[in-house]
Amino acid sequence: MRWSQTFIPTMKEVPAEAEVPSHQLMLRSGLIRQLMAGSYTWLPLGYRSVRKVSEIVREEMDRAGAIEMFMPALQPIELFERTGRRDAFGNVLFNFEARRGDRQLHFALGPTHEEVITDLISRHISTYRQLPITLYQIQTKFRNEERPRFGVLRTSEFLMKDAYSFSSTVEQLNEAYDAMYNAYCRIFERCGLKYLPVEAESGPIGGDASHEFMVPAGNGEDFVVNCPACGYAANQERAEIGCPPNSTPTTEASAEPQIVDTPDAGSIDAVSTMLGRSPQEFIKTLIYLADEKPLAVLLRGDHTANEGKIRRAAHVASLELADADTILQVTGAPVGFAGPVGIKCPIIVDHHAAAVTSAVTGANAADQHLVGVVPGVHFDVGQTFDLRNAEAGDPCPRCQSDLQIVHGIEVGHVFKLGTKYSVSLDATFVDREEKSHPIIMGCYGIGVTRVVASIVETCHDENGIVWPLNAAPYTVHIIPLNVSDEEVMQTANQIYEQLNEAGIDVLLDDRDQRPGFKFKDADLIGLPLRITIGGRGLQEGITEVRWRAETDVHKVPVAETVQFVRQQISAAQG
RNA sequence: CGGGCUAUAGCGCAGCCUGGCUAGCGCGCUUGACUGGGGGUCAAGAGGUCGUGGGUUCGAAUCCCGCUAGCCCGACCA
């Protein structure tokens, strides 16, 4: 492609609305333009990258035995009512009515396609002989995000590969899952992304049933907990925390707790400042309504609650923070002064809260706290649980080393669904004995456009994008330094044509611009290989070939340039 | 959905507080000349419903009220 014939609107200045590097660079390098909040146009250069990544995904899905198809984005709302996801999605589900003749139809725009595909399968698969099968599509998904942000990283309309496996046995499901998991690793490797598979929510099947693929990035919205020693990695909702070393309550500390006045100090911050004690010496008491009944959750002062863990530990379905009235009832005090001593509701204690040897707690009285509270002495502890979010420095659940926390961008998710959708949409098969069972499903997603944004977010330097080879919009960028120099242009055109014939994607910057201007644009759009052709080099009979990611310049005889570039590319592709 | 900020040329911004004549600056864009290895120089130009609706005023980009859009923080994110 000749630059003068395509559409690459680069910008020298950073648009004010862009905060994160990927958003800034994608705007500046002419990959995308915003239409409205959460909706972006993919310009020619950006769209080429989307297609490159899509093709990698497609190849690896096919290699893993998945079959491509294409389903409608426009779907009847009834399907979501049958699976209960109309409520589960809530406002995230785009849905609207439209008149057709004298009928009023109600549609949804697909946020994902479990319903559509399970409905399809339920109509056409009836026997174990037709299973297993994995189907996939690459398609635009719609989610009414409450707050789109970070450019293309979080939008209300995005390209996603979604695959669904249908199995007659758990073994078949596990095989399909492993095949997808391995395909995902290959995909992200080929895209040049550093990625981390992490354990995610376990869902209905339990155990090792879900992994997220995260790209470590400072601006990632998700938190990944990982152990540098043994490789344990999980998302923050899911991450387990090792037990602290056993601390036996010291009997000498069994003196009665003392009441201290803490006027208007109802937060850990305020009380710790007032008393000059660190938050680690506090036990905070959170009052929840667990299945409508009050429950006090005890955590160390500097820790944060993990409601999923609390729900599981307490064996309850619903969990929400209690209102002020409930708190007044069970503690006898306003919000901010709850404590375990004398509280009038069941308590559940985190491992690390129980390990505080002499704690500051609320006194269950307005404007008062207790100091010198010893768990197990001044209140009953019983069994302790893991109830909080993991933090940097917590012990690894596998090897006790210190855990790290990194930000990550979720680019893929594999999930053993089980029979949730097949049951609600009546997708069943009969086994050898003619007994009917719901089909066992898995679902597997990759955010294709998010992958492109993640690449830009993580592969750049101060001058612009540094595309990995396989995801780059073009592989080679030819820069003739002076378009009015006939010899320069003739050489550039010749190399351009030969590379094209060799099946290599080439961009030829044929604009009549100064060299510096072209170099800056070349750095900005960041194509992997640059061939510079100038009068100075031609006098020596050479072109200059340089990787965007490296500083070395290869001076290559003009006649050997095409061959050299082809060798460089195939060597880099391994 | 709560809290905050912003809206003036394609992009980045000044002007607004303290109302006043023709609304400015840099980049970009057009034309020409010189130039040609890291966003070059000179000259001449084009480009604006000052987001939108109302109000105050002799007079509004500027003051007041409503609306809309965008961004940030938080909540949310099968």
Image (spheres, helix red, strand yellow):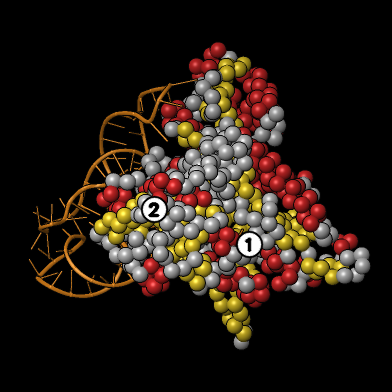
The residue lying toward the viewer, choosing from A472 and A319, is A319
Residue A388 location (% of width, % of height):
50, 53
Residue B40 higher or lower than A277, as above or below? above
- Depth check: A195 or A270 in front? A270
Residue A94 in view (yes/no): no
Chain letter of mark 2 equals A
Seen from the viewer's position, the closer of residues A499 and A467 is A467
Label placed on residue A373: 2
The percent coordinates of residue A46 (x first, y second) are 55, 45
Quadrant where the image shows the N terminus of chain A: top right
Q: Chain of mark 1?
A: A
Q: Mark 1 or mark 2: which is in front?
A: 2
Please tell me whether residue A489 is drawn above or below residue A329 in the rendered image.
Answer: above
Residue at (66% x, 34% y) in the render: A504
Report the residue marked by disc 1. A112
Query: In the rendered view, does B63 fall on the left or right side of A89?
Result: left
- Identified by mark 2, the residue type is Val
Q: Quadrant of residue A430?
A: bottom right
